[in-house]
């Protein structure tokens, strides 16, 4: 648990966390720390409160696609080394 939500990171590195689960009254969101860097062919990721934050919202159990979730988590894990090496540069104001 970090920031009041179940949050997942590799090797306890919560500065560069992978994703978290946000539970609200009418939906559940899977939030990706650097989701803006992930490929998203179906335009499922919704822009969040930061430059890189992206989320997928689910409003019912039927709307949850486990394979889609696994795919995004895998993409995030694969992109993690790039993000860790370049986050300062990527985060600079345009």
Image (cartoon, rainbow, N blue to C red):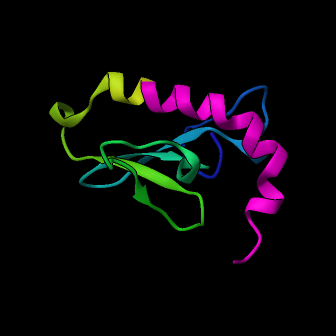
- Residue 26: in magenta span: no
Which span is picked out in magenta?
A: 71-94
In the orientation shown, which residue stands out farthest toward the bottom?
94
- The spot of residue 5 in percent (x, y) is 54, 45
Left or right position of 41 against 33:
left
In this rendering, the count of numbered labels is 0
Q: Residue at x 56, y 40 (%)?
A: 19
Residue drawn at (83%, 60%) of the image: 88
Q: Is residue 62 left or right of residue 12?
A: left
Question: Main structural element of the magenta stretch: helix, strand or loop?
Answer: helix
- Please tell me in which quadrant of the rendered image residue 84 appears: top right
* x, y percent for residue 43: 33, 50
Pick the residue in front: 61 or 43: 43
Question: For the C terminus, which image quadrant?
Answer: bottom right
- Residue 50 drawn above or below residue 79: below
Q: Is 88 left, or right, of 64 in this rendering?
A: right
Q: Quick one: 62 or 25, which is closer to the camera? A: 62
Which quarter of the figure is the N terminus placed in?
top right
Magenta span contains residue 87 = yes
Q: Residue at x 64, y 28 (%)?
A: 78
Residue at (72, 28) in percent of width and height: 10
Image location (x, y in percent) of residue 29: 38, 47
Q: Nearer the viewer, residue 53 or 4?
A: 53
- Residue 76 placed where, x, y %? 58, 35
Establish if 57 lies above or below 71: below
């Amino acid at each position: 648990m970090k920031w009041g939500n179940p949050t997942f990171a590799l090797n306890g590195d919560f500065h560069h966390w992978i994703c978290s689960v946000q539970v609200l009254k009418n939906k559940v969101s899977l939030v990706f720390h650097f989701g803006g860097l992930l490929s998203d062919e179906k335009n499922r990721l919704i822009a969040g409160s930061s430059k890189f934050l992206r989320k997928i919202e689910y409003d019912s159990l039927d709307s949850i696609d486990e394979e889609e979730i696994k795919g995004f988590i895998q993409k995030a894990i694969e992109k993690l080394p790039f993000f860790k090496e370049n986050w300062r540069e990527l985060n600079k104001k345009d």
